Amino acid sequence: MSSADNSVVNARRKALFSAACSIAIEAGFATAERAAIESLVEMLQSCLTEIGRSSRAFCELTGRTEVLSGDVFMALVEMGINIESLGPFIKRSNRITLPTPAMAPRSSTPKILQAGEKRSLPPYIPDHFVAFPDPHAYIRTPTHKQPVTEYEAIREKVASQKRDVERALTRFIAKTGATQSLFADDMTLFPLIACKPMSQPYLCALLPKDQVFENDEEPFNPKEPPGNFPDKRPSANEASEVDNPYLRSVKMPRKRKR
């Protein structure tokens, strides 16, 4: 049971406890034990609950949703209570008037985080319709930024990316290759890429290459004399070993003798 339900039950029990005490005082009792008053409270609560349940049953039996005075009278008659005795009991002279119970403070509901401002219904929608839900449920909110189209910002971004790439490449080469340091004490402080000495560095500029294939360059084979041509045709054993028919050597058809 939640705290709100507990507060309602406690308020109802306090009101019934005060009513039972006032009835006991009107009957001539000066003192009473708490257990006896609690028993009277339970009896009074059971009686009121049964009256309300029976009144609701008579109301629904006639096809209505709101309880009327006639339904209450029928419930009292069914429970065996004399309705004519209610008038003198209400008009009694020694009646004790109980003070109106104070309003319990309402528990403040925690505020829920909202994205955007909640919109009210437009004038063409009646007021009895359901209000709009939270704005994040039906309003499109882009989660990404629009691309930058300014020339200066793009140039600055390209320059920063180029600088980062060059710096990362320099660090990679410095870690994987030979390096030199400006300080003799600590070789790892401000490493510099070591320059490879070349005997004739100007030849690289005079003999440019479009593509450099250092490992794939084939060794130069001197020309063989024209008279010595080795037989490069595969033998019968080599041809039989080839399983792929597309890689086998061509077999010339035999000429038939007439």
Image (cartoon, grey):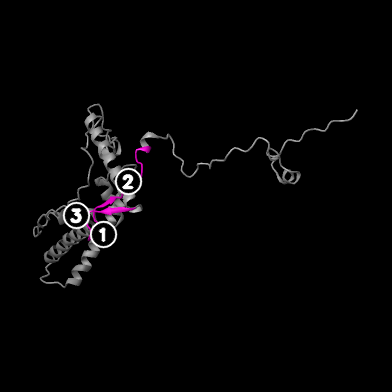
Q: Between 197 and 227, which is closer to the camera in this rendering?
A: 227
* Disc assigned to residue 47: 1
Q: Which of marks 3 and 2 precedes in the sequence?
A: 3
Q: Which residue is mark 3?
A: 86
Whether residue 170 sits left or right of residue 31 in the image: it is: right
Residue 21, picture quadrant: bottom left
- CA gap between label 2 and label 1 equals 90 Å
**Callout 2 secondary element:** helix
Task: Note whether residue 253 is visible.
Answer: yes
Q: Residues within 10 Å of mark 1 (few under 14, many from 20)?
A: some
Q: Which residue is mark 2?
A: 169
Image point (28%, 47%), residue name:
71
Rendering coords of residue 114 (x, y %): 22, 43
3 vs 1, front mark: 1
- Magenta residues, start to end: 178-203
Rendering coords of residue 139 (x, y %): 28, 35
